Image: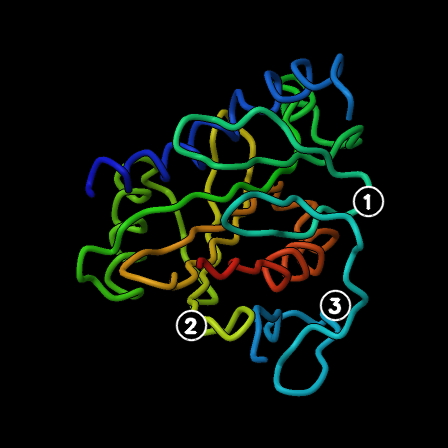
Amino acid sequence: MKNKIAIIVLIIAIVVIVGGISFYFIQKNKTPNNSVDNTASSTSKVGTNNQIDSEQPQNKLVTDDFEISLPEGWRKATPAMGALVIAIKANEQLADPVAQKINFRSYFAVSHDALQGKGLSEYLQSIKNQLQQTISDTVFSQERDVTINNKSAQAFEASFTQQEVNFKILMVGVKGMNDDIWIISFNTLQSTWNEYQETFSDIANSFNLKLKN
């Protein structure tokens, strides 16, 4: 499972650098409960039971195993290795000139792995350790227990710098129906975090596993 954790980390660490370029140009020619909250942010709209109080988007990404909201202006892209689905913010206009140069796009990805007897905290700590080893200046924050559609979950935020660009991520680990975990990771620039954090929370809260016969 260590290799799979490394792959999930690489989705974060590598996709933020070059993924936006390939995602954008590949797709350019194609047809287009307690929940994750932002209690630490003054810009969040929090309703009862710490749930984000905002209207959920109607568009969805649907697979055989799960469905998740795809907000207006976001588009499904070709997944990087280790990801089941990835979606980017199409036509995003970023002020950061270095981010523009690498054609970065804010994105979210969904991955899946076996827990192999580990708890959510232990598994996510492994991801954090691997991410810290990969990007040494990573700073973690806002670690919390949450519930996603009646499934136990944990979330954390992290900030780091790659290629002179300051990034911020939200990662949510959702306990599956068996000994498995679903990882929903979100990435944007630190400068655009306030713009996207509520959208990221809405997307995470919309994640819904399908019952198997």
Identify residue for label 3.
Answer: 43
Q: Disc 2 designates what residue? A: 152
Q: How many marks?
A: 3
Q: Nearer the viewer, residue 1 or 18?
A: 1
Residue type at mark 2 is Ser
The residue drawn where x is 48% and y is 37% is 84
Relative horizontal placement of residue 211, taking residue 196 as reference (left or right): left
Q: Does residue 85 sit above or below 43 in this rendering? A: above
Query: Is 77 in front, or is 168?
Result: 77
Give residue 147's position: percent from left, percent from top: 50, 74
The image shows residue 107 at horizontal and vertical percentages of 62, 38
Q: Position of residue 168 (x, y in %)?
A: 54, 47
Q: In which quarter of the image is residue 97?
A: top right
Q: What element does badge 3 sit on?
A: loop
Question: Which callout, 1 or 2, points at the residue further toward the start of the chain?
Answer: 1
Q: What element does badge 2 sit on?
A: strand
Question: Which of the numbered marks, if any, corresponds to residue 175?
Answer: none
